[in-house]
Image (cartoon, rainbow, N blue to C red):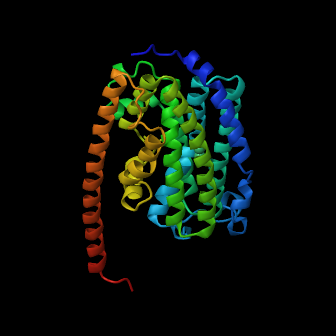
């Protein structure tokens, strides 16, 4: 197997790619303003300012839409943790530094606009939302814990750093794009849908930056990059992992097509692996070939898991529909 490159060597070799992709990003990104996406007319004071406090009756969002909005917002709120991961693993200089600053500023908009929307429209309980934000941000994002909880053998996570970060964010940006986009659809409110489409467009551009950088890393040091990519794919957890009500909200979102296993496999993992030609390349050494085979087996298993999940989901939804049909009609 070829020598593994150090973190510094990777950053230096890939700097021209980062620069090209920062330029590409800046030429593609359209400026937008969070205040243009919030229906301020719907707002009114809460009790502390002489108005009325939140009441569940005021929300027009379904339980699924609420769960998805809260999950997406708390994920965006955790930006300081993600910024730390990216800033620690990328350089602060040159194109890397420019990207870290720009990406962080763009991400911050997402949390701003979603919170403004939810509070102004009284779509969710603002007190519960604030408590959950405090818990989630205090806990932060811990990639080692996330990998360990997902069953990764930590002795294999020895050279975590740039490659793991860039592989993770490639999938994570695309996952958040899918999640925001589908949350917009279940909100049944054109204003929310427009806002979430706007955010999803940002996430797509972010994904392209990371995907191009990670793809270039794969060309530069194929076995080393594939090892990081496979580790991330096989132990992937959504970025909001561990937040309050994570399981409950995740199940609701999966059950109602906001983000489920098949979407994860077919709309997030496979398009990126195809773009990198992972299964067609002939530049892997023996180690890369071995990892690729393992990755292939994992993806096959995931395909089977999708079918099982969908069967369970169909049964659960049918049970719920029967229950609804049998329930006495409300006067
Ligand atoms: Fe975001
Ligand atoms: Fe993003």
Give the image quadrant in which the ligand numbered 2 is located: top right
Total tally of numbered discs in the picture: 0
Q: Is residue 134 left or right of residue 18?
A: left
Residue beneath the point at 54% across and 18% down: 7
Q: Position of residue 54 (x, y in %)?
A: 58, 63
Q: Which residue is at the far top?
A: 3
Q: Position of residue 1 (x, y in %)?
A: 39, 16
Please state which of residues 22 and 144 is positioned toward the viewer in this rendering.
22
Residue 102, compared with residue 163, is above or below; it is below
Residue beneath the point at 55% across and 41% down: 134
Q: Is residue 196 left or right of residue 41?
A: left
Residue beneath the point at 39% across and 86% down: 331
Residue beneath the point at 58% across and 42% down: 208
Residue 255, compared with residue 167, is above or below; it is below
Is any part of residue 247 visible from this angle? yes
Is any part of residue 131 visible from this angle? no
Q: Which residue is at the far front?
A: 282
Q: Quadrant of residue 238?
A: top left
Q: Position of residue 66 (x, y in %)?
A: 49, 60
Q: Position of residue 210 (x, y in %)?
A: 57, 37
Please state which of residues 198 and 250 is positioned toward the viewer in this rendering.
198
Please state which of residues 147 and 19 is positioned toward the viewer in this rendering.
19
Q: Which residue is at the far bottom?
A: 331
């Amino acid at each position: 197997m070829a020598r593994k490159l150090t973190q510094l060597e990777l950053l230096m070799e890939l700097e021209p790619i980062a620069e090209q992709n920062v330029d590409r990003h800046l030429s593609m990104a359209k400026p937008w303003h969070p205040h243009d996406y919030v229906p301020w007319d719907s707002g009114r004071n809460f009790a502390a300012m002489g108005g009325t406090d939140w009441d569940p009756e005021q929300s027009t969002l379904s339980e699924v839409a609420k769960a998805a909005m809260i999950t997406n917002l708390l994920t965006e709120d955790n930006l300081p943790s993600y910024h730390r991961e990216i800033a620690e693993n990328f350089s602060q200089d040159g194109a890397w530094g420019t990207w870290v600053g720009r990406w962080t500023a763009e991400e911050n908009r997402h949390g701003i606009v979603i919170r403004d929307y939810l509070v102004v429209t009284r779509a969710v309980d603002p007190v519960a939302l604030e408590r959950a934000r405090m818990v989630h941000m205090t806990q932060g994002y811990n990639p080692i814990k996330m990998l360990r909880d997902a069953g990764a053998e930590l002795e294999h996570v020895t050279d975590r750093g740039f490659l793991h970060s860039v592989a993770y964010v490639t999938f994570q940006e695309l996952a958040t794009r899918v999640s925001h986009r589908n949350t917009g659809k279940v909100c049944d409110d054109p204003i929310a849908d427009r806002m979430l489409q706007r955010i999803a467009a940002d996430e797509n551009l972010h994904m392209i930056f990371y995907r191009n950088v990670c793809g270039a890393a794969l060309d530069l040091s194929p076995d080393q990059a594939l090892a990081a990519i496979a580790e991330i794919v096989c132990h992937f957890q959504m970025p909001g992992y561990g937040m309050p009500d994570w399981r409950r909200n995740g199940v609701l979102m999966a059950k109602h097509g906001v983000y489920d296993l098949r979407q994860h496999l077919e709309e997030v993992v496979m398009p990126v692996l195809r773009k990198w030609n992972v299964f067609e390349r002939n530049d892997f050494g023996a180690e890369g070939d071995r990892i690729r085979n393992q990755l292939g087996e994992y993806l096959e298993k995931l395909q089977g898991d999708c079918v099982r999940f969908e069967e369970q989901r169909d049964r659960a939804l049918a049970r719920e529909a029967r229950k609804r049909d049998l329930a006495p009609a409300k006067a």
